[in-house]
Image: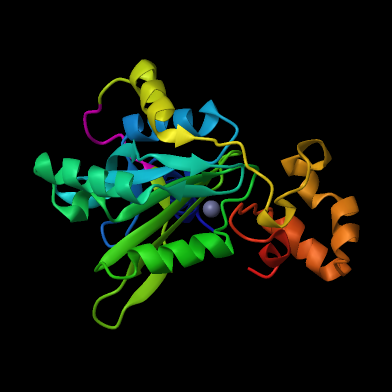
Amino acid sequence: MNDATIAERRRTKHRRWLRHSNPYQNPRPHQPTLRFSPTAWAKLLFLRDLGPTEVGGFGISAADDCLRIEDVQLVRQSCTCVTVHFDDAAVADFFDSQVDQGLPPSRFGRVWIHTHPGSSATPSLRDEETFACSFGSVDWAVMFIVAQEGQTYARLRFNVGPGGSLAIPVAVDFSRDFTASDHAAWKAEYERCVMTPEPRPPAIFDGWPADTLPRTNEFLDEEWADFFGWPDDERELAYRHEEFNPSEPFAEVVHV
Ligand SMILES: [Zn+2]
């Protein structure tokens, strides 16, 4: 191998290294990528880390680029460590307020964002159901999840034409001007929107004296699984689902 070949190989390797070494690089134009402005990204992580529960909201897209998220807006929601439930009236109010500000729905109602505790950003069964039910009638939508430990998940779905769905990369986009962080305003938004109601016991415990009721976390204890006589495989499901729905008898939860 002569010196010219070696030099060329080095240049190629260097160019390749440059292409793959920067996680914040601008994606290739043909590759759909969910990109956050640095401010929106900082706000999302701030909101994620503010309390012990999941939080959720909508991404506000740039006027000229629906996959560039310039803000994350919370709506009133009740949250647990593993679920987010948006208040329907609050979502309607949020939509109205965005329209009043002159934004089309494609800029504020297509990118659904929420956080996960722990390390996994993989959507849960409930996430998939929500995405299908609440975002199945619009022309396109994105489900984006960021986990406590940083893992991200983004999926773009088209509901028009032949339809389709693809996981897309996520990036922080520094290519445009961005505003400063505002922790006080973000915290106020969080406190205004995120409710963490004390769960109450399932209906099957109605009428039980208060001092005999188990506390919420105890519902998933082995003791209670024994009480209900669950087989091991159903316990496994229940622990994984970790869902507590006060309106349903608890025994039904494992079958969700
Ligand atoms: Zn989720």
Query: Is residue 156 rendered to the left or right of residue 107?
Result: right
Q: Residue furthest top?
A: 184
Given residues 41 and 193, the one toward you in this image is: 193
Q: How many marks?
A: 0
Residue 226 in view, yes or no: yes
Image x and y of residue 241, in percent: 67, 58
The quadrant the C terminus occupies is bottom right
Query: Is residue 223 rendered to the left or right of residue 252?
Result: right
Q: Which residues are magenta?
A: 172-178
Residue at point 36%, 58% (across, down): 142
Given residues 10 and 24, the one toward you in this image is: 24
Query: Is residue 62 rendered to the left or right of residue 226?
Result: left
Image x and y of residue 80, in percent: 58, 42
Q: Main secondary structure of the magenta part?
A: loop
The reply to whether the magenta stretch includes residue 175 is yes
> Is 140 above or below relative to 26?
below
